């Protein structure tokens, strides 16, 4: 993993930026929410969350897009490098969402909850809002 990407990843999980990423994801889900795909285009076809043609997102796809917009990390393009660093980064970034789902009584993965248990965009937005509020200050 190159030093620039490592620095961007560290920046993304600083509490203030972390909250901004989750709050941006809220706005994306409010624009359009989907299931069974990271994102969808205007024809309903699955696309990557960072795709310029995306018009609706699942929770993880919205976080991917927010991370790309606010920090410049494209998770789809940054797959090379240290798997350990990538997994650790992703865990830290997504932990507030997992924590919120646990509070709601769900022990599943975020994508599983989005696809099988979440009933509306409003519910998805609420989870992201609560997750942003739960980001620990430094």
Image (cartoon, grey):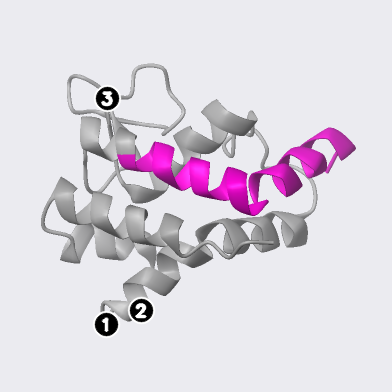
User: Which residue is labeled 2 in the image?
Assistant: 102
Question: Residue extending furthest left?
Answer: 119
Under circle 3, the secondary element is loop
Evaluate whether residue 8 shows in this view.
yes
Under circle 1, the secondary element is loop
Q: Are marks 2 and 1 in contact (CB under 8 Å)?
A: yes
What span is colored magenta in the figure? 1-26
User: In front: 45, or 104?
Assistant: 104
Q: Quadrant of the C terminus?
A: bottom right
Residue at the image point whose x is 31% and y is 35% from the top:
27
Q: Quadrant of residue 34?
A: top left
Residue 81 is covered by the magenta coloring: no
User: Which residue is labeled 3 in the image?
Assistant: 55
User: Which residue is labeled 1 in the image?
Assistant: 105
Distance (Cα) linking label 2 and label 1: 5 Å
In the image, residue 16 lies at what x, y percent? 60, 47
Under circle 2, the secondary element is helix
* Vertical comparison of 72 with 96: above or below: above
Question: Residue extending furthest front?
Answer: 137
On residue 93, the disc is none
User: In front: 56, or 137?
Assistant: 137
């Amino acid at each position: 993993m190159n030093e620039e990407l490592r620095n961007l990843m560290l920046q993304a999980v600083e509490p203030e930026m972390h909250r901004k990423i989750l709050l941006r994801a809220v706005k994306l889900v409010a624009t359009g929410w989907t299931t069974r795909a990271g994102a969808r285009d205007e024809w309903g076809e699955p696309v990557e969350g960072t795709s310029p043609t995306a018009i609706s997102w699942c929770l993880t796809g919205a976080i991917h897009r927010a991370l790309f917009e606010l920090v410049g990390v494209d998770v789809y393009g940054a797959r090379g490098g240290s798997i350990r660093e990538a997994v650790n980064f992703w865990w830290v970034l997504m932990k507030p969402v997992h924590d919120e789902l646990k509070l709601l009584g769900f022990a599943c993965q975020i994508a599983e909850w989005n696809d099988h248990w979440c009933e509306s965009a409003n519910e998805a937005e609420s989870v992201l809002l609560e997750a942003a509020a739960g980001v620990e200050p430094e």
